[in-house]
Amino acid sequence: MALTLILGACTSEKKKPEYTDTPISGDILIVVDESYKPLMQVQLDTFMKIYKYANIRVKYLPEAEAFNELMMNDSVRLAVVARSLNKEEAAFFEGRKIIPRMNKLAIDAVALVTNPDNPDTLLTYSQAENIFSGKIRSWKQLNPNSALDSIAIVFDNNGSSNSRYLQETFHLQKPLPSNWSATNSNADVIDYVNKTPRALGVVSVNWISDRDDATVNSFLTKVKVVEISSPDTSLDKEYYKPYQAYIALKQYPFIRDVQIIIREGRNGLGTGFASFAVGDQGQRLVRLMGMLPATMPIRILKVNS
């Protein structure tokens, strides 16, 4: 007697994942550039207080790792990062028949900070360029009367958006100057600068802008924020701190867009959170954190002194 083995066709078919989340409920994972941790903690806390059935888990990572997670980890729904997709990343998603959506969340400023005991807190754009390119390596080159010598440049991470931004801004080639170093986070940069008089730190402005936040006020006692001139080559130099008005007027030179890149192909919780972040409530939080809202009109009032 012959035995016939029948295999169900369904065993060879890969089932599509069943999603149960909605724009205001469910459980998802997102990745965020660590530079934007203060902003996103406020955004996520507010969103999940309003929508109590929403649970958004988050990984705070250096920019390079955040993009890797967005591409390679299918459970990641969106990323909050300081640039758009490049050609290779866009081609990767196209090859997988995924169409990412991008929403501009904010305009950020990259801030430079020094030790409180360092009297030199004014830099021209050209001086900043020469410092990061390695042409200026000593505070005495900026101020012969300085008690400090070599400049120690410190970033949050080797793969961070802050480091990548200044490399691209000043067209720097690797290997980078030997006085560049990295810690593990923007908060660590501030601590390092506080303990190292000769240090020049690089952080996102949202780490030092919310004066209603006790942690921010603590950071501001540890460092000074550097004022920088615009790239204008005129002799009469104006210097600007990374304040919102100077970001809006593009007078502060180191500014960049913050993007939300959504990879989910449906209106799930990732889409719901992104809509909140670029909507009225989310944009008010952006303004609170010292960054420039991307979708909210602003007014700049000139006060005569």
Image (cartoon, helix red, strand yellow):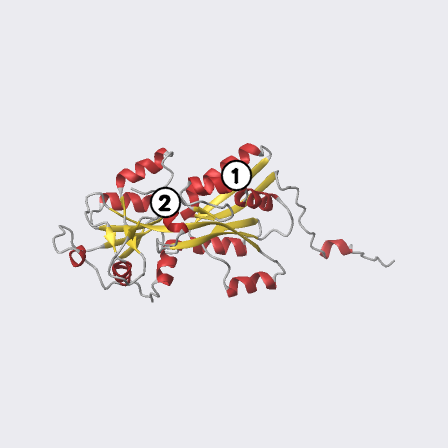
In this rendering, is residue 184 above or below 285?
below
Amino acid on which disc 1 is placed: Gln
Q: Is residue 196 visible?
A: yes
Q: Is residue 8 left or right of residue 95?
A: right
- The residue at the point 44 percent across, 56 percent down is 64
Image disc number at residue 281: 1
The residue that label 2 is drawn on is 302
Percent x, y of residue 142:
18, 57
Q: Quadrant of the N terminus?
A: bottom right
Q: Secondary structure at mark 2?
A: loop
Upstream in the sequence, badge 1 or badge 2? 1
- The residue at the point 25 percent across, 43 percent down is 194
Along the viewing direction, whichever of 224 and 5 lies nearer the viewer: 224
Label 1–label 2 contact, CB within 8 A: no
Q: Is residue 157 left or right of residue 196?
A: right
Query: Disc 1 to disc 2, how far (Cα)?
Result: 26 Å
Estimate how packed mark 2 is, as few (under 14), some (14 to 19) or many (20 or more) residues with alpha carbons within 10 Å.
few
Q: Is residue 156 visible?
A: no
